[in-house]
Image (tube, grey):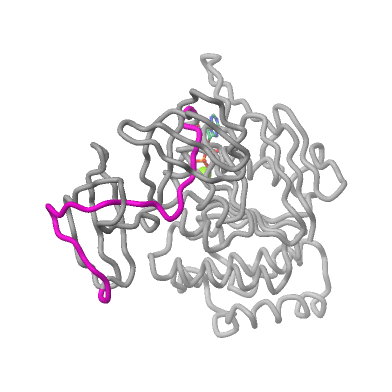
């Protein structure tokens, strides 16, 4: 496995009318050896273009890409130590499953024995032996994607690239396949770069998530960091569900921000508090499960909606003109409230994010 480093990587497309699009805009990124990294963001934010530059399918307008210590910028795609798995599977329709999987190894002129030695264990872990002699069009979508993955894995690439590989599968199979991808990647210790717009895929697969927006990186972190400490409204809104309380920073200390919202003054404790400036417009981000609803607090609110879902109780509460969405887990044994009830809200966890970044 190899590490991957992107240094100032930029791609500008220019159309016939001379109009240019900054598809990827000066991004810097370090992907550690054996790590599973996901590029996550809305459609058009530059994920595929970034991946294609790593693969060598697309030239860079600016910047450099390193595999380990080697600058691969000038190395053509077929000479780079990486393989891509596509959404469309891209299997050869006239070849059996076995021949599809062996294709790249035969191109490398490996002997029949050497090929068998590499292919057999991969077909074992992926349960593909029963289908070895079938043609791809006789297989389900999930099985075809498994063949595409096996074909990439037998190449033992230093870097394995995925572009939305599960998008064509139904919801249930997507979950099964992503668990399988993660299991195999861990087992083989491969460096993986995975592109998706699906936050649950990114959360469940990744060691590191790279949130992209309009050609730029918004935030890099573990799934937990991205969820619990989003640095912008964009990130907190794109991953999970977030409530926002907008306000202005009144004061900061090393570990605490005091924010003046419309009707309240709220203290938020966080590490980077000192980086905010007095008077700066910010948003307090509160996850639905971090809202505590009872009658003991000073922050008054009114329940506008209450729905019992079995495992959770869903609430909407009006808190000084802002509608907050809250969920309470395991509501069976707890005091519940109904629409119209006067309550108070507190936040077990909150983070201040820069609202200008939205
Ligand atoms: P994503 O994979 O995140 O959906 P892409 O990397 O495919 O995004 O595209 C990023 C931006 O670059 C989009 O605005 C897209 O229209 C543009 N783009 C991508 N490929 C080309 C191309 N070959 N020519 C011109 N513009 C392109
Ligand atoms: Mg794409």
Q: Image quadrant for the C terminus? A: top left
Pick out the residue farthest to the bottom. 130
Q: Quadrant of residue 115?
A: bottom right
Residue 136, given in percent of the width and then of the height, sits at 51, 69
**Picture residue at 82% right of the left edge, 69% below the top:** 110
The boundaries of the magenta stretch are 332-356
Residue 99, given in percent of the width and then of the height, sits at 65, 71
In this view, the residue in front, 82 or 207, is 207
Q: Is residue 328 left or right of residue 27?
A: left
Q: How many marks?
A: 0
Pick out the residue farthest to the left. 340
**Picture residue at 49% right of the left edge, 23% below the top:** 279
**Picture residue at 48% right of the left edge, 28% below the top:** 250
Q: Quadrant of residue 238?
A: top left
**Picture residue at 49% right of the left edge, 40% below the top:** 352
Residue 90, given in percent of the width and then of the height, sits at 55, 57
Q: Is residue 267 left or right of residue 331?
A: right
In this view, the residue in front, 162 or 357, is 357
Up/down of 172 relative to 191, above or below: below
In this view, the residue in front, 8 or 138, is 8
Q: Is residue 170 magenta?
A: no
Q: Quadrant of residue 307?
A: bottom left
Pick out the residue farthest to the top. 17
Residue 163, given in percent of the width and then of the height, sits at 56, 52
Q: Is residue 350 magenta?
A: yes
Q: Image quadrant for the N terminus? A: bottom right
Pick out the residue farthest to the right. 69
Up/down of 32 relative to 330, above or below: above
Q: Is residue 8 left or right of residue 315?
A: right
């Amino acid at each position: 496995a190899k590490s991957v480093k992107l240094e100032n990587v930029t791609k500008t497309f220019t159309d016939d009318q001379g109009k240019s699009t900054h598809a990827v805009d000066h991004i810097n990124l370090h992907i550690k050896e054996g790590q599973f990294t996901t590029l996550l963001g809305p459609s058009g934010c530059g994920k595929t273009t970034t991946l294609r530059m790593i693969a060598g399918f697309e030239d860079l307008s600016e910047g450099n890409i390193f595999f380990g210590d080697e600058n691969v910028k000038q190395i053509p795609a077929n000479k780079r130590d990486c393989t891509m798995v596509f959404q469309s599977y891209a299997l050869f329709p006239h070849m059996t499953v076995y021949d599809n999987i062996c294709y790249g190894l035969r191109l490398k002129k490996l002997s029949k024995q050497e090929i068998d030695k590499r292919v057999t264990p991969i077909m074992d872990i992926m349960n593909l032996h029963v289908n070895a002699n079938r043609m791809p069009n006789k297989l389900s979508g999930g099985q075809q994607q498994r063949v595409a993955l096996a074909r990439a894995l037998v190449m033992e690439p230093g870097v394995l690239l995925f572009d939305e590989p599960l998008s064509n599968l139904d919801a249930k199979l997507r979950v099964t396949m992503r668990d399988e991808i993660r299991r195999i990647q861990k087992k083989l210790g491969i460096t993986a770069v995975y592109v998706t717009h699906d936050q649950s895929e990114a959360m469940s697969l990744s060691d590191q998530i790279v949130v992209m927006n309009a050609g730029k990186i918004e935030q890099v972190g573990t799934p937990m960091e991205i969820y619990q400490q989003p640095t912008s409204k964009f990130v907190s809104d794109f991953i999970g569900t977030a409530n926002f309380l907008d306000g202005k920073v009144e004061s900061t200390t090393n570990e605490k921000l005091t924010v003046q919202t419309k009707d309240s003054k709220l203290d938020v404790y966080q590490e980077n508090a000192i980086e905010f400036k007095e008077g700066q417009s910010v948003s307090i981000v509160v996850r639905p499960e971090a809202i505590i609803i009872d009658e003991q607090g000073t922050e008054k609110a009114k329940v506008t909606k209450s729905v019992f879902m079995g495992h959770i109780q869903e609430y909407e509460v009006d808190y000084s003109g802002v509608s907050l969405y809250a969920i309470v887990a395991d509501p069976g044994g707890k005091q519940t409230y109904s629409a119209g009830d006067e309550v108070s809200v507190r936040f077990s966890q909150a983070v201040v994010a820069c609202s200008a970044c939205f």
